[in-house]
Image (tube, rainbow, N blue to C red):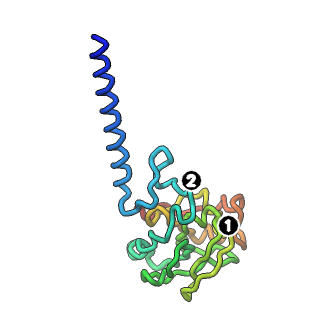
Amino acid sequence: MTLRTLDIFARLCLAVFALLCVAGSATSSLRIHPHSLAYFNEAAGGPENGWRHMLGSNLDWGQDLPFLPEWSSRTASGEPIYLLYYGAFAPASVGMNCRLPRSSSLSPGYYVVSVNFIAGTYWHVWDEGGHPRMAPPDLLRSFRGKMPIGRCGYSIYIFFIDEAAASSASKSYPSVNKVRNVVLSEPRYNS
């Protein structure tokens, strides 16, 4: 092979590699539609782990709340839904009538939690009357190491606390160390 042939071959390989990178990036971005605000490439852990890199409005504007009624109608089956949602409009605007978690104990039911609250972000939550009030930081940070049973988009995670787990939990919202004994149910829904 001549030097000129090697140069042409190297350029061709570089062009093919660049084309594959662009196609891979486009595919990666398009696969999470309509959740593009939560896009993180695979090197960052994908959209499932984006909250570990950025929080607040970088990831969550409340765009995933409209997916909650569909999940609820397919899955919740009469169990109470406790919602800590990070967004600017009331959950009632999408037809959700959820409870705030009690600050005195964990109760059995579904906990629908914005990743911002899992990470300990300080923000307002919506009470049962549809009014915003400030949530204490770290309210449900205890769920941070737990596997969610489902999610709405990439910014709202869903956990289930069964009767046994609720009765074994501390009388107050436990710290991360105290919640390790809380057992979440098997997955009932995966998006």
Q: Quadrant of residue 121?
A: bottom right
Residue corresponding to mark 1: 138
Eye-nearest disc, 1 or 2: 2
When the figure is inspected, residue 68 is found, relative to residue 15, above or below; the finding is below
Label 2 residue SS: loop
Q: Quadrant of the N terminus?
A: top left
Residue corresponding to mark 2: 53
List x then y, in percent, for residue 50: 51, 55
In the image, 188 versus 164, the foreground residue is 188
List x then y, in percent, for residue 5: 27, 16
In the image, 138 versus 55, the foreground residue is 55
Which residue lies most toward the top here?
Answer: 1
Identified at 30% across, 33% down, the residue is: 16
- CA neighbours of label 2 inside 10 A, class few (<14), some (14 to 19), many (20+): few
Left or right, residue 90 beside residue 8: right
List x then y, in percent, for residue 40: 46, 52
Q: Amino acid at mark 1?
A: Asp
Identified at 68% across, 69% down, the residue is: 137
Which residue lies most toward the front here?
Answer: 4
Give the Cα distance between marks 1 and 2: 18 Å
Identified at 68% across, 73% down, the residue is: 136
Q: Quadrant of the C terminus?
A: bottom left
Q: Amino acid at mark 2?
A: His
